[in-house]
Image (tube, helix red, strand yellow):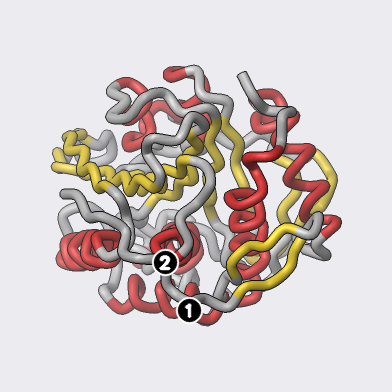
Amino acid sequence: MKKIIPNFLNLTLILMGCQSIVPKFDEDHAFEYLVAQCDFGPRNPGSDGYYACLDYMIAELDQYADEIILQDFSYQERRYNNRYELENIIARFNPDAEFQTVISAHWDTRPWADQEDSRRDRDQPIIGANDGASGVAILLELAKIMGENPPPIGVNLVFFDGEDLGVPGENSTYCQGSRYFAKNLPIPRPDEAINLDMVGDKQLVLPIERYSLEYHPKLVRYLWDRARDMGLDAFIGRVDYAIYDDHVPLHEIAGIPAIDLIDFKYPNPYANFWHTMNDIPENCSAESLGQVGDLMVDYIYNREGQNWGEK
């Protein structure tokens, strides 16, 4: 599937950073993308919501991307030994640019609300407003922006499937989409990667994930410094614990310097909506999407002039 970007369209521009001009990230429209995904219901592999959301994302991306790659694979999950046919989506922008980055998120949702207090609900699929839809919402809004404002660098928006089919305590059963992508790169190996996960929490707090600091310290420092300069107060310059997420296979298998933006304490350190029936749009916010989206737009349109991260 391939689509040529249309002529440059009018879009409100704002001044950000070091007198650079970057497009505006529309947090309210991004939140509409979050709600639209949740309106399909749970998007766990094999469900009606899964296939409806897959068609929806491809239709949205086809309006904006230079190229779309669909990467099919299968996986037999370990809890009930069900086999699923899964699909990563790669939307490419400026694929001929010398510098190539990945911005990714997983689009599948957890088939089991195994963190529910109520035992009878633990086999129910979750809606995944934060754990799934939030990262995808930002990527879809980035696609719209880049379709209207071609980026100066190569950007690959990667929607990973099969991230949340895992068994607790067994890391290798999670992140199947990123594992497959890393083993079977459908594009030339990118220079770096940023993964977005659980970034829509109303009480958003984004410390530095420990693996990220190990894998790509220069990018971590750059982004958190930019967030501070931009007044994005969700970003906290504190190193927190390591989390096995989609950035780990990218680095360990494909050797891609990769980092993770994640607020794992959802909604806060004293309560938990993660992998429960409470992971719904009402517990997410457009403002949180805007904080992460603003930083990603700044990164895309200002990354070209930075020499700190070059190979």
Image coordinates for residue 261, horizontal then vertical, percent: 62, 48
Residue at the image point whose x is 30% and y is 50% from the top: 66
User: Dot 1 lies on which element?
Assistant: helix
Image coordinates for residue 59, horizontal then vertical, percent: 22, 65
Query: In the displayed structure, does residue 228 sit left or right of residue 152?
Result: right
Q: Which mark is residue 188?
A: none
Q: Is residue 116 in sight in this rendering?
A: no
User: Dot 2 lies on which element?
Assistant: loop
Considering only vertical position in the picture, is 101 above or below 114? above
Query: In the displayed structure, does residue 247 sit left or right of residue 66?
Result: right
Image coordinates for residue 179, horizontal then vertical, percent: 36, 28
- How far is mark 1 from mark 2, CA to CA? 20 Å
Considering only vertical position in the picture, is 214 above or below 93? above
Label located before the other in sequence (1 or 2):
2
Q: Which mark is residue 29?
A: 1
Residue at the image point whose x is 43% and y is 18% from the top: 253
The amino acid pointed to by label 2 is: Phe
Query: In the displayed structure, does residue 23 sit left or right of residue 167?
Result: right
* Closer-to-camera residue (54/281): 54
Residue that mark 2 sits on: 8
How would you rate the neighbour count of disc 2 (Cα within 10 Å): few for under 14, some for 14-19, many for 20 or more?
few
Q: Give the quadrant of the C terminus.
A: top right
Residue at the image point whose x is 52% and y is 32% from the top: 99
Image coordinates for residue 251, horizontal then vertical, percent: 52, 23
The amino acid pointed to by label 1 is: His
Residue at the image point whose x is 27% and y is 62% from the top: 57
Q: Circles 1 and 2: CB distance less than 8 Å? A: no
